[in-house]
Amino acid sequence: MSERTVRVRSLTTFAEDGELDEDAYRQFLQRFVDSRLGVYIGGGSACEGYALTPDEFRRAYEIGVSVCKGKVFIGSNAAEVHTARDTIEQAKIAIGAGVDVVNIYGPAGWHGYRPNREEYLTFFDRILTEVKYPVSVAPNPTALDYLPEASWIADICNKHMQVVSVNFGGIYDDTYLIELKDRFVREVETYITMPFALSGFAMGATGLNAWEANILPKTYRSFLDYYDAGSMSDVGRLYTDIRRFEKFVHSNYHERWFKMALKVFKLPGGKGGFREPYLMPGDDVLEQFAASLMALNIPEIDEMARTAGLA
């Protein structure tokens, strides 16, 4: 297997006036290039792709391609929508900008809607009949509000040759990977989440999807480098650091913590914060957040704190 990697759903950086901060975005993406991590642009959730206009999506993809292409993987990750028509329109914007791969979710589970097998497969048939471009399929119960069966995902991959990978998100059970790989009739890359990285790599997973690498790119790179080198004591140490970090931020701050970290550590995009309806917490909350992160004793956090003048 070639060098494993992380593919990061990149945050979108905004200026203080709320506009897309292009200079900060270039600087933010360069951090991933420097750490040899792949990048997906335009995702929902903390990435705030739902707050971008079509023109801003196009510009974000163009910037991503200019910074990353030919150096690290660059893909589009437009947020989930409800129709094949809207998904195709999103894909066309990304393809026009020259990304490497277009990531596609299933139909969004809005207002209690859950697709059955026929509806789910028809959704992808209609898209992939028109989108003749490398595609990744994303069974993500956090985004979609349901988990498509592994057999559905395998059927899509086996039928449509332009599907090159499957991106796990919000899936923490390695039996899903087992069933998926059992049903593949050809080679398809799989990108899993950190909670079952060790078992998943042992079963042949290609790499990681890690939103948290927005803040800790060097730590994630080191984790993979140690794994590839067979230095399992270092793998265990970094796995412990990462999982402790993940538990703290997600248990206490939900998705807001990403932009909070940009602000307290003075990373590119930290001045602009969120787009409405979300708001940056007050200084007292930010101070406690920063102190709690530094108490985790993770070297990369300590380095960012020193650079920001916090330690």
Image (cartoon, rainbow, N blue to C red):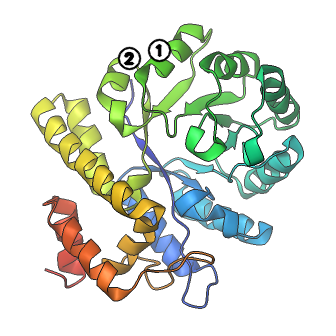
Residue 245, position as x, y percentages in the image: 27, 54
Residue located 38% across and 17% down the image: 203
Residue 113, position as x, y percentages in the image: 77, 39
Q: Amino acid at mark 2?
A: Met
Q: Which disc, if any, is residue 293?
A: none
User: Given contact means CB atoms under 8 Å apart, are the residues at marks 1 and 2 in contact?
Assistant: yes
Residue 300, position as x, y percentages in the image: 21, 62
- Left or right side of 154 for 182: left
Q: Quadrant of residue 299?
A: bottom left
Q: Split into 4 quadrants, where in the image is the C terminus?
A: bottom left
Residue 62 in view in this figure: no
Q: Quadrant of residue 309?
A: bottom left
Residue located 61% across and 59% down the image: 65
Q: Is 113 placed above or below 263 here?
A: above
Residue located 28% across and 72% down the image: 289
- Left or right side of 34 for 90: right
Circle 2: is it few (<14), some (14-19), or many (20+) Cα within 10 Å? Answer: few
Of the pair 137 and 130, the residue shown nearer to us: 137
Residue 128 in view in this figure: yes
SS label for mark 2: loop
Residue 144, position as x, y percentages in the image: 65, 42
Mark nearer the N terminus (1 vs 2): 1
Q: Which residue is the site of mark 2?
A: 203
Q: Is 188 placed above or below 284 here?
A: above
